[in-house]
Structure formats: structure tokens, C-alpha cells
Image (cartoon, grey):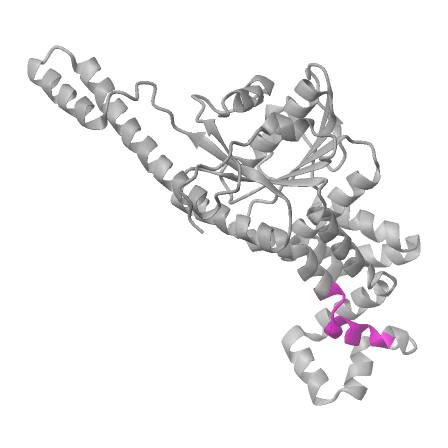
Amino acid sequence: MPSDHPAPGLDIDALLADPRVRTVVCCGAGGVGKTTTAAAFALRAAERHGRRTVVLTIDPARRLAQSLGLIELDNSPRQVKGVAGGELHAMMLDMKRTFDDVVLAHTDPKRAEEIFANPFYQAMSSTFSGTQEYMAMEKLGQLRAREEWDLIVVDTPPSRSALDFLDAPARLARFLDGRMLRLLVAPARAGGRSMFSLVTASFGVFSRAVQRILGAQLLTDLSGFVAALDSMFGGFRDRADQTYRVLQDRETAFLVVAAPEPDAIREAAYFARRLSEERMPLAGLVLNRVHVVQAPALSAVDSQEAAAALDELGDHTGTADALRVHAGLVRQEARETAVATAFRHQHPGVPVASVAALPTDVHDLDGLRAIVAAMS
């Protein structure tokens, strides 16, 4: 229900310093600064609070490596140099390598080799919808199981839909553990006959329809894939369920990152509702790149009128231009405030923090430090 009471302020330092919080998940729409925000919070946790921290990014733009002073990131944590006080590591999800690690961990080497060589697996492990999100959660589970980190900060996959990140693990698990694939794996359990020969003999019209749709080779590849994965069925479902429990645990804190723009705020509001419905702990909203007026007493109307008066004098072009820029900034701040207020009315109990827009792009540790310093 809407409320006239202002949302409580988000104390990011209290969150990052809390030893009970082991995972911080930064989520939200694409293009709102999740990657740099996640890196800034991880750096803050390490430097200000002395926590051994790792930040996991799934952003393919590789901006995180540059801002942390690393040449590149890969699927293994790399220590960040120049961190004052604590210890910070960073890594970027390698989707296929993580899937390969899952296969190696849950089957024998010979069966793993068969899986890796299968064309269907090669395609699915690299491009299948939801695989990236699912493997991000697999990697999170691996990091937590190592008990090596005080805090794990996760930069979620860039996505236009909040549903993708929350639903992908269960969706992929349902696919890999579904009735159709169990039907396809039946030949391996029935004595090793090929999928094609068994369905041709047993399923008649159905098998011919499937063959026409998928093609005989793809059907053979799919059969080999599910047969090789037979020992892993159920494991995907179990890990998806475990991942969901991790996300619901009070040791996890979700931070929704948004820009003060209508589309991003709508996405943030929807995400907040989903997290509430799924009983996942929402710690707060981070409004990124908020514009701040340095002379709030000077209104947009007064600025425009003063600029017009100076134009008539003809000798103060620079001052008139500055007044017009100020007027535009005042109007922008008003629009951003209205958009943020809409979120606060919809979710009055969600703590909110604002990050003032920085004059330059973030490209180093000092830039990351400036993000937290600009929070209010």
C-alpha cells in the first residue's frame, strides 16, 4: 500500500560489516551499474571492515577487471592488488567451464569425456537459455562450500527480466530432469539400444514426428546426451532446490540496483515484489547515478529568466549558459525524485540509498571507492 512515510535509509556499511551476512546479491535491470556497484561494495567490505571478500561478476563487458586493475578475469578468484587493509579477490563466470566442473564432480572421467564430446552438450553448455543464470548459482554454491570467504558479492547476469535470474535455476533443472528427457533416456536403461532404433520400433507415429521436427542426427545427439547424463539426473533438481534455499537464507542479502529512470524503477519494483513473494531477504534499493543540484535555492524558472536577461545584455554568454545548464539539472533532479518517490510509496519498508552521479567513468580502485563515498 502507498505510504506518506519516507523509506528508511540503507546503511551499506552496517550490511557489509555484519558477520551474519555471507552473500550479497546485486540485481536489477541491465545498464544500471550493477557491476561497478558490486565491485565497490566488495572493495568497501575488504578495506573498511576487514572481510575476506570475493566478487563474482557475470557481466560479459569485462569492466570489472579494468576497474580492479586486473588484466583479465576468469573462472578462478584472482587477488586484487592495492587493497588497503583487507583482502579482495575477483572472478568472472565462465559458463561452460562451470558446467564442465559440475559434470566432472558428479560422474566418472570416462562418462564425462562422452558428455563433453556430445554436440548437444556443447551447444547447451554455451548458449542454452537459462544456463548462464543457473551456472552463476552453481558457482555461488561452490564458493560458499569452500568456506574460504567472509563475504561473497554477486553481480547478477545482465537481463531485462527479473524472472530470468530467479527462475532460471529451476527452469534448467526442470528441463534436465523433465519427463520428456526421462523418456529419451529410457533406451540407455533398456539395454543400450540407440534412441533412433528404439523410438522407431516403439513409438511409431510419435517417433516419426519427433524425427521430422528435430532431425535424426540431433535426435541421436540428444539421446547420447541424456544417456551420458543419466547418472546426474536428480542432481540438477537437488542443487536447484539447494540454491533456492541459499537465496532465501538470512545469510544472503539482495540489493536491487536501479537508475532513477521510469523503466529501471519499474523493474526494481517488480523485483522487490518477487523477492517478497519468494521470501528472499531484500536488504534495500541502491539508486545509482542520481543527479544532485548544488544550488537548490535557485529554481529552474529563476535560472531561465536570469539567463534571458543576461542574453539581452549580450556580455555574459558563459554565465547565461551556466544558468541554463542549472535549470536543466533542476528539472532532471525533479524527474528523478518523482520516479524514486513512486518506488518508495510502493515499497515503504525497503531501505533506500542514493549514489550521486560521478563526473567521470569508474576505471580504477579510487573510482570504486568514490561510489560508496557518494552514497547518501
Q: Position of residue 372 (x, y in %)?
A: 55, 23
Residue at 82% across, 47% down? 101
Q: Image height check: is 178 above or below 42? A: below
Q: Image height check: is 5 above or below 215? A: above
Q: Image height check: is 365 above or below 178? A: above
Residue at 80% across, 42% down? 142
Determine the image quadrant of residue 176: bottom right
**321 sits left or right of 130 in the view:** left
Q: Is residue 70 visible?
A: no
Q: Position of residue 236 (x, y in %)?
A: 78, 58
Q: In the image, which residues are magenta?
A: 175-187
62 drawn magenta: no
Q: Is residue 139 visible?
A: yes
Determine the image quadrant of residue 345: top left
179 drawn magenta: yes
Q: Position of residue 278 (x, y in %)?
A: 63, 54
Determine the image quadrant of residue 65: top right
Residue at 51% across, 43% down? 30
Q: Position of residue 146 (x, y in %)?
A: 84, 37
Residue sticking out furthest to the top: 315
Residue sticking out furthest to the left: 312
Q: Image height check: is 312 above or below 267? A: above
Of residue 325 and residue 114, the one placed in the foreground of this image is 325
Magenta stretch: dominant secondary structure: helix
Of residue 315 and residue 48, the one placed in the foreground of this image is 48
Q: How many marks?
A: 0
